[in-house]
Amino acid sequence: MKFIDPHIHVTSRTTDDYEAMAAAGVAAIIEPAFWLGQPRTNVGSFQDYFSSLVGFEKFRAAQFGIRHYCTIGLNSKEANNEALAEQVMELMPLFLAKENVVAVGEIGFDDMTAAEEKYLRIQLEMAKEVNLPILIHTPHRNKKQGTYRSMDIIEEHEIPPHMVVIDHNNEETCEEVLRRGYWTAFTIYPKTKMGNERMVEVVKKYGAERIIIDSSADWGVSDPLAVPKTGNLMLERGIPKEHVELTCYKNALAAYGQSGQFEESDWLSPEPIDQRSLFEGNSVLRGGQTPRVDKPEDDRIIQ
Amino acid sequence: MSYTPIQLLENWILRQASDAGQAWLDTQREAVASGDPKSLYLAFGFAPRKIGKADLELTERDLNDAAESRPGWQPQTWTIDQAARVLLLMSLPSEDDAAYLATIEKLFQTAEIREQICLYQALQLLPHQELFDDRLAEGIRTNIKTVFCAIAHCNPLPMELMSEPAWNQMVLKALFIGAALDPIEGLDQRVNPELARMLIDFAHERRAAKRPIPVELWRVAAPFADEIALEDMKALYTSGENLEKSAIALALVSTALDEADEILKTDPEVAKRAESGDITWRGIAEQAYASEN
Ligand SMILES: [Zn+2]
């Protein structure tokens, strides 16, 4: 089975993770712009981070047979540094039209401050202007209020729910998010957001329509194989294969496919070899071939 | 009659683009010409979506026109969005050097891979090229081979602008990352003793590690071959594979060294083919990198 992990911060992951993800069937990933753990103090840091998301990280992933896409946005925590936030808003037009940008995100609330709301609204308008889907990050604290408030604001801006993915849901929030018609995403992130046994129960209860599973794996203790592991667990626990395909692949494709920049043919039947866009080592990945991994036969020998 | 690069790009796009794409491009070029960087940034980003990503369908004649309008310009690998992006760049007002440089630099700093390829190939047609020598030197530090090749291959700017250290780094790095040397414009004109020394050291090091030596290396190293180089060449000429032998023969033939004749005598068959023009550097490069295409 093929998987999409539509929310993973691979910038923090190693090449071992990429190898394991490819081996587990992860064909495409989306890396939402988020914070790096340490707050950025100037706009140049954002510029270089965004550049790495649309450039080097996409290239690095391709070397392991994984198609990399991203979302661009100012995250909620850093929206609270208003002087910096203003400069990031000026920077965004340089990035929103890049080829692997499939949404504006992840944006939303952390502390639910006025500044967070201001930059959420500005970015919602930007997404409308360039006709991109939106990825909403919902807060860890005061989650229910933050989630509902985000949806209220989106509705004030007259953005249709099918253009929006609300992420980091749990058993408490998902019913309302589904009811209002949004893509309802769950982060399988150990110890905090959602475990995969709980996820199995959610899919049993609510079905697979508009539900999306991701790992959000980043620099914290997290699992880049969360999507394939959850998919396999769902199969084991008797969830129909169609539902696994929807939650671990097809729904993400439909949601982010609305960008026009996220198509299955990108990874299933790649364009003919193109010397201009060929990434180093990527020639072996054409036509569904397995990626070349140059591992010495004897692990003790370093060639 | 001869054309300007702008006329050529316009004609090529006109031949291939949809009416809607063409209309979009015309409008954007006007907006960019008014001097607003934001319109350039957005249009530059959206060009592939609006005008497509097809290869430019260029005839032999088009390529000749290109080389006539800008010596060294070889647009045979260009795509239609690349052409459109270059026209957008060429619409940007350029009277103010500093402002012009700042705007183009912003694009470089935020470019994704295809955009970087486009920008590095575009520079050869843009004004104020002399301001971009540092940018070229910076560009070859990339880890991304296609971006490196957009600078090094089929691009007259490195030959025209790069300082000797930057040029030497580019040639050495090409060998390191497995990029061909033959498509580097001005390769034979800009050989120099320092470059040859670096390549000779590199070859010697590889031989000591029992690793293969890129065969094109000898083209650049041979004109300044020292004792070590000659010894390595001699050993490889006796024991190497066919392609390696051909390359070494061709390299030795081009030198006037007495030792070269001695080495060539050990396999007169290959030497004869090198002397007769049967072996060429283009052919060697094509064979060396055949598996990549
Ligand atoms: Zn995230």
Image: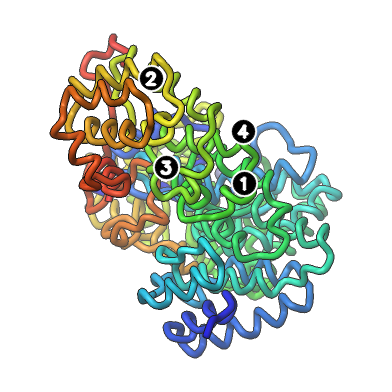
Q: Are marks 4 and 3 on the same chain?
A: no
Residue B284 position, x and y percent, is 27, 43
Query: Dot 3 corresponds to which residue?
Result: A61
Q: Is mark 3 within 8 Å of ligand 1?
A: no
Query: Dot 1 corresponds to which residue?
Result: B136
Q: Which mark is residue B229?
A: 2
Mark 1 neighbour class, 10 Å CA radius: few under 14, some 14 to 19, many 20 or more: many
**Which mark lies nearer to you, 1 or 2?**
2
Query: Dot 4 corresponds to which residue?
Result: B165
Question: From this viewpoint, which residue is outermost toward the top?
Answer: A300
Q: Earlier in the sequence, mark 1 or mark 4?
A: 1
Residue at screen point 66% across, 57% down: B107
Tell me if label 1 and label 2 are in contact, CB under 8 Å.
Answer: no
Residue at screen point 38% across, 30% down: B256
Q: Are marks 1 and 4 on the same chain?
A: yes
**Which mark lies nearer to you, 4 or 3?**
4
Tell me if label 4 and label 3 are in contact, CB under 8 Å.
Answer: no
Q: Circle 1 sits in a helix, a strand or a loop, which is it?
A: helix
Residue B120 position, x and y percent, is 57, 55
Residue A141 is drawn in which quadrant? top right
